[in-house]
Image (spheres, rainbow, N blue to C red):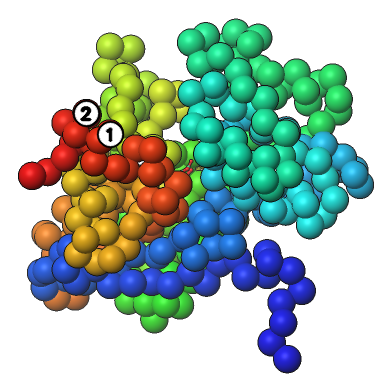
């Protein structure tokens, strides 16, 4: 019989798909399509991993509560594992979170607390501080994906080995978006351990801190940090989950390039990914364009564009000047 014990057993082993229409050149460009995961995103990999790390550290007791400041994919990943293991989940989310995302988290059994966006991260009303207060007052477990080493480690143990196996060890470049940095770092460490010549390149947004940090080893001046429209990558602070020792470079992608690539991927490759997938594909294509026939560039699409239909539609794209005639 081929029956899974539970849905999380279907986690990982996502398909690696060639992008032969998006990129035509001597080098090969391929993407791991993470919306094949059971909760629909790459974050399913770290949801279960961070919960098991909490159990091991004795921070999570049977029937206990998990609280995370998140507005999306990580919440779904945590909710799946929490349900199957009998934990309660509270997500502290910024109040700009779309209704669909609240509905998704609530459908998965999470309690969603919306917190004001227009206050600093250190304000007690911010979603970070609300999560910390619930941890302190209720003895809840706070996985904190930006600081939890189980996040990059999950990619070291799953995403990295999958890429190595799926490319038969022929991968030459690993190019992925940097949000918490977990994906690029964990898989990057694994791939470099197999072959130190593999180049590991992060994709950042214009307005975020990573490119500047890579070049200067310090945060950029405040005036260089600003908002952007790409979802899920780039940050305005430095998390503890970027393993800089394994990164060889960072490319930055602007909103226009990312959204255009997102729509091109849907129309030409029939892969509808979120804007962070469009950004990753754009960065990976830049890398692939400089390579010969031996180049094998692997990138990753974190989730599906269906999660962002309130943005990935003609009206919104036109309003933001992102619609390509
Ligand atoms: C949609 C989306 N894309 C990309 C990323 C980046 O992945 P990582 O956090 O592993 O760097 C995230 C993470 O927050 C995300 O939610």
Q: Residues within 10 Å of mark 2 (few under 14, many from 20)?
A: few
Q: Is residue 249 above or below residue 322?
A: below
Ligand 1 neighbours mark 2 (CB distance < 8 Å): no
The count of marks equals 2
Q: Position of residue 243 (x, y in %)?
A: 47, 43
Looking at the rendering, which quadrant does residue 145 occupy? top right
Look at the numbered disc 1 and give the secondary structure of its residue: helix
In this view, the residue in front, 54 or 199, is 54
Look at mark 1 in the image and give the residue it sits on.
316
In this view, the residue in front, 92 or 135, is 92
Furthest toward the bottom, the residue is 1
Q: Is residue 56 above or below residue 289?
A: above
What separation in Å lies between label 2 and label 1 (alpha carbons)?
5 Å
Q: Residue at x 24, y 41 (%)?
A: 314
Furthest toward the right, the residue is 62
Q: Residue at x 46, y 28 (%)?
A: 238
Q: Residue at x 40, y 65 (%)?
A: 32
In this view, the residue in front, 163 or 88, is 88
Observer able to see residue 304 = yes
Q: Position of residue 156 (x, y in %)?
A: 54, 59
Q: Position of residue 61 (x, y in %)?
A: 90, 43
Mark number for residue 319? Answer: 2
In this view, the residue in front, 295 or 274, is 274
């Amino acid at each position: 019989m081929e029956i899974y014990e539970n849905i999380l057993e279907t986690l990982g082993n996502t398909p690696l798909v060639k992008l032969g229409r998006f990129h035509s050149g001597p080098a090969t460009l391929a993407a791991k399509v993470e919306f094949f995961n059971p909760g629909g995103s790459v974050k399913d990999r770290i949801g279960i991993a961070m919960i098991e790390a909490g159990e091991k550290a004795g921070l999570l007791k049977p029937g206990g509560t998990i609280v995370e400041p998140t507005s999306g994919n990580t919440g779904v990943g945590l909710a799946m594992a929490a349900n199957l293991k009998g934990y309660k989940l509270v997500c502290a989310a910024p109040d700009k979170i779309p209704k669909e995302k609240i509905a998704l988290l609530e459908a998965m059994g999470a309690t969603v607390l919306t917190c004001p966006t227009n206050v600093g991260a250190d304000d007690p009303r911010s979603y970070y501080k609300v999560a910390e207060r619930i941890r302190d007052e209720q003895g809840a477990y706070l996985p904190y994906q930006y600081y939890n080493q189980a996040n990059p480690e999950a990619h070291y143990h799953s995403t990295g080995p999958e890429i190595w196996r799926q490319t038969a060890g022929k991968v030459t470049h690993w190019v992925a978006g940097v949000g918490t940095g977990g994906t690029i770092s964990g898989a990057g460490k694994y791939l470099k351990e197999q072959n130190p010549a593999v180049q590991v390149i992060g994709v950042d947004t214009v307005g975020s801190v990573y490119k500047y940090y890579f070049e200067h080893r310090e945060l950029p001046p405040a005036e260089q940090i600003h908002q952007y429209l790409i979802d899920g990558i780039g940050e305005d602070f430095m998390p503890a989950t970027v393993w800089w020792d394994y990164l060889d470079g960072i490319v930055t992608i602007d909103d226009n390039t990312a959204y255009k690539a997102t729509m091109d991927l849907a129309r030409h490759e029939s892969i509808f990914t979120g804007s962070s997938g469009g950004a990753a594909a754009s960065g990976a294509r830049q890398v692939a364009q400089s390579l010969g026939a031996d180049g094998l560039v692997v990138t990753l699409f974190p989730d599906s564009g269906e999660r962002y239909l309130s943005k990935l539609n003609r009206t919104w794209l036109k309003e933001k000047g992102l619609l390509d005639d």
